Image (cartoon, rainbow, N blue to C red):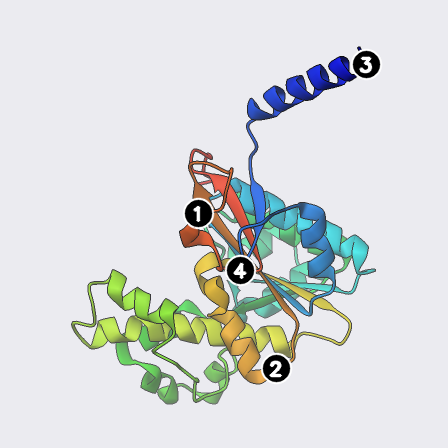
């Protein structure tokens, strides 16, 4: 009788689980199901964690906040944050805000914030401010990425020394055969002109600059948790590739975000994108 009751309870539990609507699921690089605790454990042992997000996905942003909070507790404050969404020439105004030297109103008026800042990135900035954490503006100013898009890396050589302090040191290393950069050209219909050929170069200078400022601001014993669009770190390329060029022994953990119709298994095309793959239902609402 007791055995039958246990079987009945197990059946009810299974049926109930099938009827659940999970908001996300985590997988390993090879597609094995894993959980948030394993992510935190791995991330806390890393020098750099690259969290690739879907910019308009609320689950990506929520899990970024949760991981920040968990690492803050696990690392005894030895945590530094940074993001693609803040450009290097805005570092001073960001630092002044975090230090309480300027008001939130001044910060939000003077920094070039993304349109979804208040819903998606402000919670991270607020956490850093309230916890006394550094938050690094890592990205190249968009005007200089645009310059590369128009003129190639050669355009950067025309900039002043003052301007170059916001960019990774020149010359920028670049491997056009990296699959991510080649795919960018394919998505644009092939290299049909100079501008198209420069599109992946503009992406590369962003990746190189973000890697540069991560390394510049990483102290021994700390974990640098960096937020960027998932394309900047998928397939262990982008920022990760540049980090390894300068620091091959660096322990890096990458997280990729993707959407699927089903969360039961990891789709073949999403395997091997990162150490951890965050899978979110395609029906998930968007933040903008």
Task: Determine contact: label 4, label 3, CB under 8 Å.
Answer: no
The answer to which quarter of the image holds residue 138 is bottom right
Cα gap from disc 1 to disc 2, whole angstroms: 32 Å
Residue at the disc numbered 1: 267
User: Camera-side residue: 6 or 285?
Assistant: 6
At a point 65% along the width and 19% down the height, the residue shown is 11
The answer to which quarter of the image holds residue 191 is bottom left
User: Camera-side residue: 27 or 219?
Assistant: 27
Residue at the disc numbered 4: 274
Mark 1 or mark 3, which has the lower sequence index? 3
Q: Which label belongs to residue 247?
A: 2
Residue at the disc numbered 3: 2
Q: Quadrant of the N terminus?
A: top right
**Residue 83 in view in this figure:** yes
**Residue 129 in view in this figure:** no
Mark 1 or mark 2, which has the lower sequence index? 2
The location of residue 121, given as percent across then percent down, is 57, 50
The secondary element bearing badge 3 is classed as: helix
Cα gap from disc 3 to disc 2, whole angstroms: 60 Å
Task: Determine contact: label 1, label 3, CB under 8 Å.
Answer: no
Cα gap from disc 4 to disc 1, whole angstroms: 13 Å
The secondary element bearing badge 4 is classed as: loop
The secondary element bearing badge 1 is classed as: loop
Cα gap from disc 4 to disc 3, whole angstroms: 45 Å
């Amino acid at each position: 009788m007791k055995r039958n009751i246990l079987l009945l309870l197990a059946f009810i539990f299974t049926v109930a689980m099938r009827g659940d609507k999970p908001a996300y699921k985590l997988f390993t690089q090879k597609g094995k199901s894993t959980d948030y605790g394993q992510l935190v454990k791995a991330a806390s042992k890393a020098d750099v964690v690259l969290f690739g997000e879907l910019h308009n996905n609320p689950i990506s942003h929520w899990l970024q906040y949760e991981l920040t909070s968990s690492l803050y507790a696990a690392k005894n404050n030895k945590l530094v944050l940074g993001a693609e969404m803040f450009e290097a020439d805005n570092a001073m105004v960001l630092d002044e805000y975090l230090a309480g030297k300027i008001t939130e109103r001044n910060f939000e008026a003077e920094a070039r914030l993304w349109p979804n800042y208040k819903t998606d990135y402000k919670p991270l900035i607020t956490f850093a401010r309230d916890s006394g954490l550094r938050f690094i503006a890592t990205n190249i100013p968009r005007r200089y990425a645009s310059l590369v898009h128009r003129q190639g890396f050669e355009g950067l050589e025309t900039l002043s020394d003052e301007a170059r302090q916001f960019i990774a040191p020149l010359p920028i290393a670049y491997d056009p055969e990296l699959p991510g950069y080649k795919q960018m050209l394919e998505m644009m219909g092939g290299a049909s002109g100079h501008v198209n050929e420069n599109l992946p170069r503009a992406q590369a200078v962003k990746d190189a600059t973000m890697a540069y400022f991560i390394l510049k601001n990483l102290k021994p014993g700390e974990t640098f948790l960096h937020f960027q669009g998932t394309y900047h770190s998928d397939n262990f390329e982008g920022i990760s590739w540049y980090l390894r060029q300068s620091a091959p022994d660096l322990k890096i953990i990458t997280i990729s975000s993707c959407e699927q119709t089903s969360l039961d298994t990891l789709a073949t095309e999403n395997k091997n994108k990162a150490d951890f793959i965050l899978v979110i239902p395609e029906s998930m609402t968007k933040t903008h």
